[in-house]
Image (tube, rainbow, N blue to C red):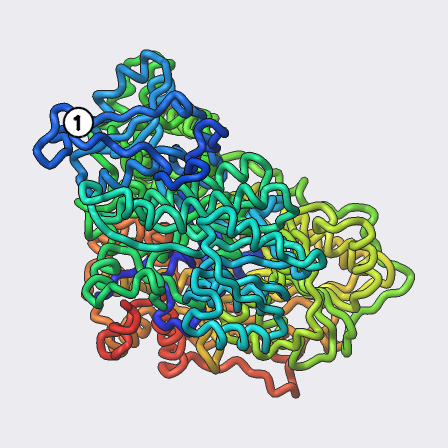
Amino acid sequence: MPAATTPCSAWTGGPSASPRRPSGPPPWHSWAPTSSTPSSSPTWPRRPRPWTRAPCSTPSSPGTPRPARGRTSPPCTRPPTTPSGSSRSGWPTTAWRTSRSSGSRGAPWRSAARTSRTSARPPSGDCCEPPSRSRPAGFVLVDLDDDPASLAALPALVRSGEAQAALRQGRALVPRVTRVGAPAPGTTPGGTWNPDGTVLVTGGTGTLGALFAHHLVTAHGVRHLLLVSRSGPAAPGADELRNSLTALGAEVTVAACDTADRAALEELLAALPADRPLTGVVHAAGVLDDGLVTAQTPQRLDAVLRPKADAAWHLHELTRDLDLSAFVLFSSLAGVIGGAGQSTYAAANSFLDALAQHRSAHGLPATSVAWGLWEQLSAMAANLDAADVDRIVRAGFRLVASDAGPGILDTAMALGTPALVGVPVDVEALREQRTSVPLVFQSLARTPARRTVSESALGTESLAALLEGKEEAEQLRIVLDLVRAEVAAVLGHFDPAGIRPDQAFPELGFDSLTSVELRNRLGAAAGTRLPASLVFDHPSPAALAAYLHAEIAGAEQAGAGPRVDFAAEIRLADDIRPADEVHVVAEDPEDALLTGVTGFLGAFVLRELMRTTRARVHVLVRAADRAEALERVRSNLEWYRIWDDIDPGRLRVVVGDLAAPRLALTEEEFDALARTVDVVYHPGASVNWIHPYATVRAANVLGTEELLRLAARHRTVPLHYVSTTGVFAGPVTRGVPLKVTDPAGPGEILPNGYTQSKWVTEQIIGIARERGLPVNIYRVDQIAGDQVNGACQTRDFVWLTIKGMLQAGAAPAELPGVFRLMPVDYASAALVAVSRRRAAAGGTYHLCNESHVTFADVVAHLRAYGYPLDELDRKTWFELVRADPENSAAPLLDAVELLVADSESFYPAIATTETVAALDGTGIDCPPVTGELFRKYVEFFADTGYFPAPRESGAGAEASR
């Protein structure tokens, strides 16, 4: 079966099978199995997710690698030709320890808490990584401080197998790549594009220069381009490129200049017109000259370092006093992992990463993206043949698609992190290369560099037995050691001592997937069942150890987490009351406010409003600015293949945040919106089955309260709230579908924070209705893809479970349960149609498909489509999935067990009587789930790369390219 993938440049499903398709859902949702609407926050199609090396140090001026003025030199000292103890080849036969020069020895390694799973990466030591890849036994790069404990720890570090590390007070810090998510609210971007100034692109007539020049013009409105290369106008295709950009409305200058020549570059910049000053730089130039370190000569070094490192430094020095809004450096994966035979090229690119850190530390815009190999091979890589490309892909590094790369850069700049990696990673392929996985990628491949303490700490003895008879303080120490060992195992650290007891799990790099894996490992070690929200309820190793100790000891204070007083949560601010003028329905709105448009249902509600009304639609989007917000909307709708149905002239982007007071708007913006909109549609939410109520409360409960305040303020307008059928704890009467009048909740017995937040919000809406506010509630069940194109969300229990089966190549025998898959285009059409009917105002409606497919039907369909699935007994299948942390179904096994135990309670039947009556005469009916419709969904997932291609089709070869 083709390998499932986890691309760093996109999302947890895999890169696109076709370069013409967006490479995955947008990067703004955190991972979450969803029961209805995805988060409006993936988390992931034209703005794919980059990865970051975590963390990079911030170089001070003395330690910043740089070419010397007036001559070309490598950005680090070359190793001696024949060090003592070396073999005839000039390299030591045993590990060679190198420490920093005095200029950078003991330099601080900045803790990138937001993205790191471990520390760290030096700014000037990167250049020693390529030789270590050329001769792996030859180098161990260690940055030592002056603490004696660090020197004492050195032998153990050398034996660990790490090629590069820092020792601080005896603690080892090692570089690792980790995933990055959406920019947090208030994040300062690494740069923006000023459409009124001039953007200089080095390598501007090359493949990548041309690609990104078009992106700057079409996506960011840049009107003045200076494309620079050594050949300039004489470069092949230069005239065609200029004509193409001019036709798009840009003024383009193509200039010949050797940017490694400081005087020539200075003259070029001085010639720019005063009314079009330089405001942005894209340094995409570079030269390859592969060869081992022992084969290098000064001339070969110069040929590679001048266009990359020297030119970058000249650009930095000559522009640092200008008012630049963006300074982008095109680095390479070679500088991150080293590349056999790419010593000089890797060193040059490591210099670019360090330069970006240096600029950022001095308050200057900087973004360095380490690219992998491009699908549209540039001139630098044109010498690669099919075998070379296949070897790179087999190693786990997929090609960067030309339609995805510009989105990676946009995301990288929005994140504000100076140096990131933008490469689609095939995690399954990495895991198959266990003996050769680059150390910095081992956290992603879940292959620890050596055996972790957790594998031997308990031995065959149970944790309870180990604690028996010991003092409480000693018991807590043992449990804390276990927790730290398991954290290290999950993150791929070689030494649990590097895990601080007080360090927050998000700072360590935990996400929903790794949180569930840690819960599973601790549960197995402790011999007890632990809640899925364990890591979110107890946010540090010390807090988690205290809880686990109390749980094992049977202490009364042990519990699943902080208790919520749901009765106290059901309150509505007193100022939220209807105005003198109340509109209970908006039959023909001129202006509508819509949330959740970067999610699934919200995207289709936007399309439905565009199709069936004349309204201008104001969409609330979390982003750094309006340009980024619009890009998020466009990317999401392109993933669902409905962007062409949107009229941009009627789209109004509002930068805000559901989780913030006043939706993160100014008082003036909030008030103006309240005066403008005729109706509010609210499908947006933070959707996650693992996060506790406290985590999602701000977005889901308080955000709705702010929308009620906005809708009520001046002339009270209707609000249409999207809830979930998950507010029901189970059927009231076995075999009888749940009606809208049946009691929901209470919160105390609902299974997760998301459904609890929806239940609480429904109770608050009850108060609003009592006060006279017109609010409709739409409880949504399982949403499937579009009936026409099959486009569907990926983070739903059904599709994650199916993907998990495909990854495992097996299905559990006789799994009970039915899936009532409701097409998203029906759900959105029904919601908008009901919202515009006066007779339906103020009601509660169930949106559900009363027809269904069984689990056995699903497996039969998959096999018929070309997916060979072995049938395993449930226990064996559970063990198979649980043993694979990357399996999409692994975090869902608790839910699958609930499905097995009581399928009717897990997915109860839902009555749609009120909905059907409200839709009478509209011609809107929910279609049955046929084999043809189900296949359309599967084909969409296979086409986008989220599912592997079925064996019977020819798509497999295409998807693996």
Vertical order, 317 against 5 (above or below) = above
Q: Nearer the viewer, residue 336 or 655?
A: 336
Q: Is residue 433 left or right of residue 489?
A: left
Q: Is residue 4 visible?
A: yes
Vertical order, 370 against 381 (above or below) = above
- Percent position of residue 912, x then y: 57, 73
- Percent position of residue 750, x then y: 51, 49
Q: Check disc 1 and give the amino acid type.
A: Pro
Vertical order, 72 against 58 (above or below) = below
Q: Quadrant of residue 953?
A: bottom left
Q: Is residue 3 left or right of residue 926?
A: left
User: Which residue is painted at 77% across and 77% down in the image?
Assistant: 587
Residue wearing tag 1: 83
Residue sitting farthest toward the left: 88
User: Which residue is painted at 44% across and 49% down in the image?
Assistant: 260
Q: Is residue 765 left or right of residue 675?
A: left
